[in-house]
Structures are given as structure tokens and as C-alpha cells.
Amino acid sequence: MVSPVSKSVVKVCVHQDCCRRGSERVYARLARDCSSEADIRKTEDCFRWCAKGPNVAVNGNVLHHIREDTAVSRVRSELRSPSIKRDGIGARSLDDLDDVLENLAP
């Protein structure tokens, strides 16, 4: 049996600092234009990069300074060609980190 391909996850921080910088508008644009490409979610779990907000995590990689007018192109670019970012590790769950560490060991 073939397992279904899981959809990419895009989390838009709507915690107070990101929200003040326009993350609700970013979320609305992504939900409208990218919902067929990824699971678009709001989160109040702070990514800890408040000064660089609004922040959006694409499959765990955190993108900074997201603007409503460029959000779709930046997220699509990240979906097509995922970056390796030092910032991404803070947006991952403990289960995800366990998987990463298991894959690093020979």
C-alpha cells in the first residue's frame, strides 16, 4: 500500500509582535493563494525572532520579515527549494528533532 504524501505545513506567527507587524494579513494572503500547495496555519507559539517579524515557518524553516505583498512568492520559493537555516531548528517539535538526530547517526 502506498502511503499518502503529506502536505507541507506553513505556520504564520500571530503572536503579538508579529501581529502588530501585519501577520494576520500575511496569513489571509497565504490562506487564499497557497492553500492548495500547503497546510496554512496560524500559531501563537512564538518562534523567538520577534524583532524580525512577521515570521512564517515553512516545514520548520523560519522566514523573516514577511510582507503581505511578497509572502506568496517567498513561501512558494521555500516550498520548491527548501533552505537550510540555523533558525529553523527552533520551530521544530521534539519529535521532529528526534527524527533529525536519528538520521544523522550512521
Image (cartoon, grey):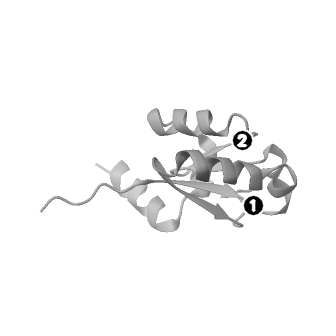
Residue 80 or 31: which is nearer the viewer?
Answer: 31
The image quadrant that residue 17 belongs to is: bottom right
Give the residue drawn at x 66%, y 39%: 71
19 displayed left or right of 86: right
Point out residue 97 in the picture as x, y percentages from the top left corner: 47, 59
Give the residue drawn at x 73%, y 62%: 46
The image quadrant that residue 1 belongs to is: bottom left
The alpha-carbon separation of the residues under discs 2 and 1 comes to 13 Å
Query: As shown in the figure, which amino acid type bears the numbered disc 1?
Result: Val
Numbered mark located on residue 61 in the image? none
- Labels 2 and 1: the sequence-earlier one: 1
Point out residue 35 in the picture as x, y percentages from the top left corner: 51, 52
Numbered mark located on residue 14 in the image? 1
Q: Which numbered disc, 2 or 1, marks the residue closer to the eye?
A: 1
For label 1, the crowd category at 10 Å Cα-Cα, with few meaning under 14, some 14 to 19 and many 20 or more, is: many
Residue 98 or 48: which is nearer the viewer?
Answer: 48
User: Which residue lies under the disc numbered 2?
Assistant: 64
Q: In this view, does 68 lie above or below 11?
A: above
Give the residue drawn at x 66%, y 55%: 12
The image quadrant that residue 42 belongs to is: bottom right
Residue 69 or 64: which is nearer the viewer?
Answer: 69
Residue at the farthest left position: 1
